[in-house]
Image: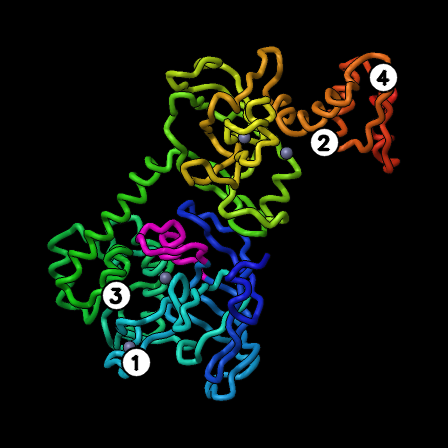
Amino acid sequence: MASQAEIEHPKKAFGWAARDPSGLLSPFNFSRSETGEKDVAFKVLYCGICHSDLHMVKNEWGFSTYPLVPGHELVGVVIEVGSKVEKFKVGDKVGVGCLVDSCRTCQNCSENLENYCPQYTLTYGAKHRDGTITYGGYSDSMVAEEHFCIALRYFALDKPGLHVGVVGLGGLGHMAVKFAKAFGAKVTVISTSPNKKKEAIQHLGADSFLISRDQDQMQAAMGTLDGVETLTIAEVGFWVFIVAPDARLAPVLGWACFITIAFSSFLLPFLLNTFGWAARDTLGLLSPFNFSIRKTGEKDVRFKVLYCGICDSDLHMVKNEWAFCTYPVVPGHEIVGVVTEVGNQVEKFKVGDKVGVGGMVDSCRSCQNCDDNLEIYCPKYTFTFGAKHKDGTTTYGGFSDSMVADEHFVVRIPDGLPLDAAAPLLCAGITVYSPLRYFALDKPGIHVGVVGLAGLGHMAVKFAKAFGAKVTVITNKYFTQQKEGSNTKSWS
Ligand SMILES: [Zn+2]
Ligand SMILES: [Zn+2]
Ligand SMILES: [Zn+2]
Ligand SMILES: [Zn+2]
């Protein structure tokens, strides 16, 4: 099933998106709009990585929405232009920076100062006028109005004869020195670290170098500068500067920013007490995911997950191939681990016990099937992941670091059984064990045929042999026969 991002516009696009504050990028299918009358469509060839991208993918400024395709230093080659485009033609090299739209009617917009427009639109993580999300340059294509397909200059510092100060020699500082020198200006680099001097003067061609902690040196120099490129002092300062040219607002935004960062860095991980790997869409790719699980209730067992099998159902579910999956989904239903906490009414387990959970974590507990210990036939059974607990919260599976489950749905793993080998018993194992028992094939003297030698088949052969039965494997793959030849012989 295609996501909204894939179908909201007519042109298919591919990019790399962060899905949550881990900031990890994974493949992302989405769509770009039709090339409008004044639009330029281009193939993205290169995209810079700016520090803002790194903050944004981790939501460190508190206004990121996911999925987020970063990148606001895009260059590429024009592949299509709208009928009213004047400055570009197919084949032109083109670039887009951090803006793709603005109100176009305010005073700032009419003075070509669109980034001071109160309604400017960031290249990614913002909303187009039609309400769809803007996606940045970590992608294969871009469509933008030609008005924003140019490099804008904000300061009249690009003239020979001026003396420009550049504060800091990070990503922006390097650029500022190179530009200012190319414009013919005299350049002084101001930095806190003396060891940047050689780089500034010899490598980048700056004319002089100041240590910002040296008060006297700074006092003497400031009067000689025509302008100081201060954007690198701090990203937060940079954004406050852009968002709030009105200085009275700056401290308010600064505090809002600080509180947001504190919340996302310290409080959120505390509330989201569990870490797992989740699929976010039908691509089925797993990426890191922080979530919360309930406190250990009276009858609950909490355990640290040590191993989890990969069942074919997990692969179907993460891609929503059975069409009832809700994202994000943390798969895994062959889960084993060691008990870390038990509720005060738990009878069968204590801390340190080895335990497992299979495909279900709850059922109605009152129907005939539940009374007969056949919970799997309960019409209201709760699947281990991608389902809802009775309290309405989502169930998350074993591709995670910890789990809480009612002891009724927790099984003991005997001490002699290796935990990694025990995990697949909890779905693949029980799936073949159950019919062998139900159809009374669990005894010597019986001759059992096992069709296919994949995950379930392996289990079936091992169980049937352990029951003392004679076993014949039936397969359509010569390869399997060869590969498993010696084992098959000893089994049959
Ligand atoms: Zn940037
Ligand atoms: Zn405007
Ligand atoms: Zn399974
Ligand atoms: Zn029931």
Q: The magenta stretch spans which residues?
A: 48-68
Magenta span includes 63? yes
- Horizontal side of 106 relative to 417 (left or right) equals left
- Of the 4 image quadrants, the one containing the C terminus is top right
Specify whether tag 2 is near ligand 3 (CB below 8 Å). no
| Residue 313 horizontal/vertical position (percent) | 64, 39
Q: Residue at x 42, y 72 (%)?
A: 130
Asked which secondary structure carries label 2, the reply is helix
Question: Label 1 sits on what residue type?
Answer: Asn
Mark 3 highlights which residue? Answer: 242
Residue 143 position in % (x across, y down):
49, 73
**In the image, which disc is placed on residue 112?**
1
- Residue at the disc numbered 2: 455
- Where residue 256 appears, as percent x and y from the top left, is 22, 52
Residue contact between numbered discs 2 and 4, judged by CB atoms under 8 Å? no
In the shown orientation, is residue 137 left or right of residue 307? left
Q: Which mark is residue 446?
A: 4
